[in-house]
Amino acid sequence: LEMIAEVSGFLLDHLAFFFIPAGVGIIACMGLLRGKWLAVLGVCFITTVLIMVVTGHTIQWMQRGRKR
């Protein structure tokens, strides 16, 4: 457990570095995305909500199985 805490602490401390490739990719594709920001934001919102719902249902399903 201590090893996991050490590795997860390292990853959390350097979390910002994981967003650099995504940010560079968005900047590189700025010409393609011009005029489509509303669609991009809509997709981001919908997928975020979908992921939250699926995660919630998965956790509930797993907890039900653990109670048996």
Image (cartoon, grey):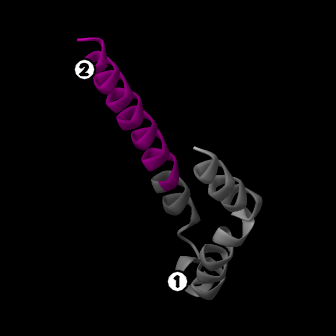
Alpha carbons under labels 1 and 2: distance apart: 46 Å
Task: Magenta stretch: give its range.
Answer: 44-68
Q: Nearer the viewer, mark 1 or mark 2?
A: 2
Q: Is residue 38 above or below residue 31?
A: above
Say which amino acid is labelled 1.
Leu
Q: Earlier in the sequence, mark 1 or mark 2?
A: 1
Q: Residue furthest right?
A: 13
The residue that appears at 34% across and 27% down in the rendered structure is: 57
Question: Could you tell me which secondary element the residue under label 2 belongs to?
Answer: helix
On residue 65, the disc is 2
Q: Few, some or many C-alpha atoms within 10 Å of disc 1 (few <14, some 14-19, many ≥20)?
A: few
x, y (%) of residue 50? 39, 41
Q: Residue at x 63, y 47 (%)?
A: 2
Q: Amino acid at mark 2?
A: Gly
Instruction: Pick the quarter of the image with the N terminus.
Output: top right
The label shown at residue 63 is none
Image vertical order of residue 65 relative to residue 52, above or below: above
Who's the residue at 61% across and 88% down the image?
A: 28
Judge whether residue 50 is colored magenta. yes
Mark 2 nearby-residue class (10 Å; few <14, some 14–19, many ≥20): few
Tell which of 34 and 63 is nearer to you: 63
Q: Quadrant of the C terminus?
A: top left
Q: Main secondary structure of the magenta part?
A: helix
Q: Position of residue 12 (x, y in %)?
A: 70, 56
Front residue of 50 and 19: 19
Disc 1 + disc 2, Cβ < 8 Å: no
* Element marked by disc 1: helix
State the residue position of label 1: 32
Q: Nearer the viewer, residue 12 or 21?
A: 12
